[in-house]
Amino acid sequence: MFDFLFKKENNKKENNKKEISKKESSKKESSKNKLTFVNKDTILIKKYNMIIYYNIKLKYPSLVIETFNSKPKNIGIQRSSMGEPFGPNPDIPQEYQYTKDEYINYSKHGGSYGHNAAAFIHKDGVENYKYTYLFTNICPQEVVFNSGLWLLFEGVSESILNKYNGGIIINGSIKGKDKVFNGTKMNVPSHMFKIIIYNKNQYVCFVAKNKPYYIDDDIKKYKNKKYDLSKYTMDIETFQKKFGLTLISKLERGSEDFIMAHQNRITQMENASLYGKIIYSKNIVELNKVAPNSDKLPEFHKIYYGYKKEYFSKNPDTHKMESLLNQSMSNPIF
């Protein structure tokens, strides 16, 4: 459906810059020939109900398109029992993907594994569910954004699919700047977008910067106990013009109540803000104030607490400065 997005090019063998054996070269070429390239940097992957345009240069998908012909089904899959099966796609050469260690390096600086197609909407089969955890569906997302606002967009998507008995979801990212995290070079998307097409010709287009979004202080004062997400929506023509994309046209912009996130999702924004307070703590004193009982933190918050504590332990000068500061405050010279 979206093949027109990219100009197809003939595959050309490129000279390897590094000297490798003929055997290794043959294996790489054989693996490459099994892939479907829509241009020199983009692989087309069709699996289950997903079409993925995966950028081998950026090492994350430019687009992930999901088609639902009915309401999402759940055969009883629970995330708590399935674990977190993040990992490389075995059908794609490793050189085109980040590794778990590289994502961990990013996480230690406030990053996370960012799903494009939401895992919880793909619980109609175990393999389908696990496929959403492969790196061909993952991109570098800031952790507060990923666990908060992006999750609200996903929740709205699910509500629309349930209400209209299916639809199409277009997930994508806008190329950002290259950054280095613990020696790992990554291109972090500047923006993420999610477009939901439903009821044949209606749509909602969410777009937001890939940065922390914190819950409004007065959110619980909303009369209907919902969080208005309309400020993160955009007209599709305006969106495409702003980012230089050609995706869809001749659709009617939706304006229904589902643009309001329900109260049960508000707690997700609160949980997301805790990630930010932990990973962006400026010193060990601040970290301990944020999480005085670290053992009682939720599982994944505890992981980020460990990342930050590890950072401070490897920077002892931070502890020395804090010690001197605390001592001077308790025993003032004047």
Image (cartoon, rainbow, N blue to C red):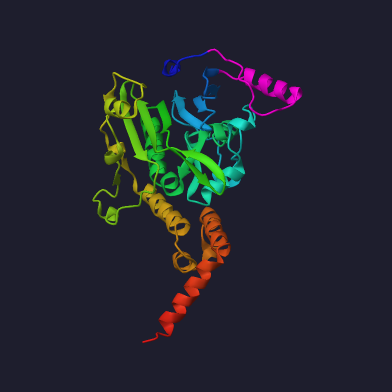
User: Residue 144 location, x and y as percent?
Assistant: 42, 49
Residue 149, quarter of picture: top left
Q: Is residue 44 above or below residue 329?
A: above
The extreme left residue here reads 223
Q: Residue at x 45, y 61 (%)?
A: 281
| Residue 96, above or below 275 | above
Q: Residue 232 or 178: which is nearer the viewer?
A: 178
Residue located 61% across and 45% down the image: 101
What is the x, y in percent for residue 312? 54, 63
Q: Is residue 43 left or right of residue 326?
A: right
Report whether 253 appears left or right of 134: left
The residues colored magenta run 10-36
261 to 271, vertically: above or below: above
Question: 57 and 333: which one is in front?
Answer: 333
Q: Quadrant of the C terminus?
A: bottom left
Is residue 68 located in the magenta-colored stretch of the structure?
Answer: no
- Percent position of residue 214, x then y: 35, 52
Q: Position of residue 150 (x, y in %)?
A: 40, 41
